[in-house]
Amino acid sequence: MKIANNTIRTEGRLPRVFRTCLVVAFLLGSARAVVQDTDDSEQKTPAKISPPAQALLDQLRQAYASLEGAELNGQIQAQVEMEGQEQKMKHKFTSSYQAPNKFRHELEDGLQMGSTGDKAYVFQKSAKAYFQKKAPDGRVPIGDLPSPIPQLLQTQNPSLLFAIIKDPILGVTDNMKEIVKLDDLKINGESFPAIALIPQDGQSKITLLVDPATHLLKRLDIEITPAMLKGAKTPNGLQSVRAQIEYTTIHTKAKFDPAHFAWNPPEDAKDVAGEKERASAEKLIGKPAPDFTLESLDGETVTLADLKGQVVVLDFWATWCPPCVKSLPELDQIYQQKAGEGVKVFAVNLKENHSQVRSFLQARGLSIPVLLDKDGEVAQKYSIHAIPQTIVIGKNGEVKKVFLGAATDAPEQIRAEIESLGTSQEVSALNR
């Protein structure tokens, strides 16, 4: 599945400020992404790669795999025609990378994104809005990077994207019909090896230039013409594109002060993920809680529908989440206090293995029952975008309250909500 398609499909689910950024990224990168997220379920014909092109790709792969630190600065130029209207863009950017998972990218219009090593973020200065998630532990497949970072980097800074993902060449070759070595191209009198990427659909022309000194990406050219599209319409009415991302600084011996990658949101900036979370929470309240069946840490099977007639508390968490770690002992106390009173309290762990969760609980002396949401499917049903998040379900199976984050007074509020659900009104609702 192409990241470009993900970009278009994802826009309706992202905050407006980042939807705008993705539209710009789509224009800059065209309707065809160079880096793609592979889908093994699809049957594809492997690209026909000439031996000289394969040798160059192998050099590129090895260069990024061994990269420990780099400074990558450059500029983006694009000329786009949509619905008969022409748009021209030119932006400079600066970026840096330090293995295994720290990076920073800043566009001159004020868009900044990166990873501190603990958290990944996107920040738009002009809108004073940010988005952040847990950073990957190291180089990961492109699909495991938190959206919208890969969608933005692929069309603003593909070399940095190559540095932070597990195997950039797999993404480059996927969905390509043919990859061939071109004659070297000259920039300011200096020769650079080049390869041409010809997609399966033939609707774009992509050229990669490689820096001979570092074997990293020097330039990316994308071209789409009406003749290539053959009358086909893209989702945004795109008619032609000429886009170029060129690196003016490629420094692979760069060393950075630890503070270089540090980032915290400004006090006056708004957390767009938090706003989205609140909106999702409001939609859940008063609705039947989505049913699920999960295995507990003790190997038992728990189905929500079987618990109707009892108050159910679901706390979504993970061991890597500091606010979760802070709030879990309070939930453990609520579990112990309410056991035997028709109240079921569960800590729903997200995507962590059995031994890791058990060791965590034992080290802290916690006894709260844990359900393992190994694939995150239950979290998705409950529209969980950030953790911790605690959901209180009434005896009639409806969501009564959603608590976001780990506020100081959250435990007291959860207790109060549980107490309120023991009223005759709740029992009456159950009997309807």
Image: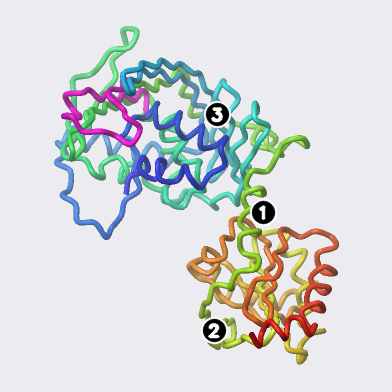
The disc placed on residue 5 is none
Based on the picture, tell me whether residue 224 belongs to the magenta stretch. yes
The image shows residue 225 at horizontal and vertical percentages of: 22, 22
Q: Residue 141 or 317: which is nearer the viewer?
A: 317
Q: Residue at x 57, y 27 (%)?
A: 106
Name the outermost residue toward the top.
189
Residue 111: x %, y % from top left: 58, 29
Label 3 secondary element: loop
Question: Residue 416 occupies which quadrant of the picture?
Answer: bottom right
Kind of residue at badge 1: Arg
Q: Which residue is mark 3?
A: 254
Quadrant holding the C terminus: bottom right
User: Taking 310 as reference, is 200 left or right?
Assistant: left
Secondary structure at numbered mark 2: strand
Of the numbered discs 2 and 3, the one sitting upstream in the chain is 3
Considering the numbered disc 1 on the image, is that residue within a helix, a strand or a loop? Answer: helix
In this view, the mark in front (2 or 3): 2
Mark sitting on residue 303:
2
- Residue 417 in the image: state x and y as whole percent: 79, 73
The quarter of the picture where residue 290 lies is bottom right
Residue span colored magenta? 217-242
Q: Residue at x 21, y 28 (%)?
A: 196
Indicate whether 375 appears above or below 103: below
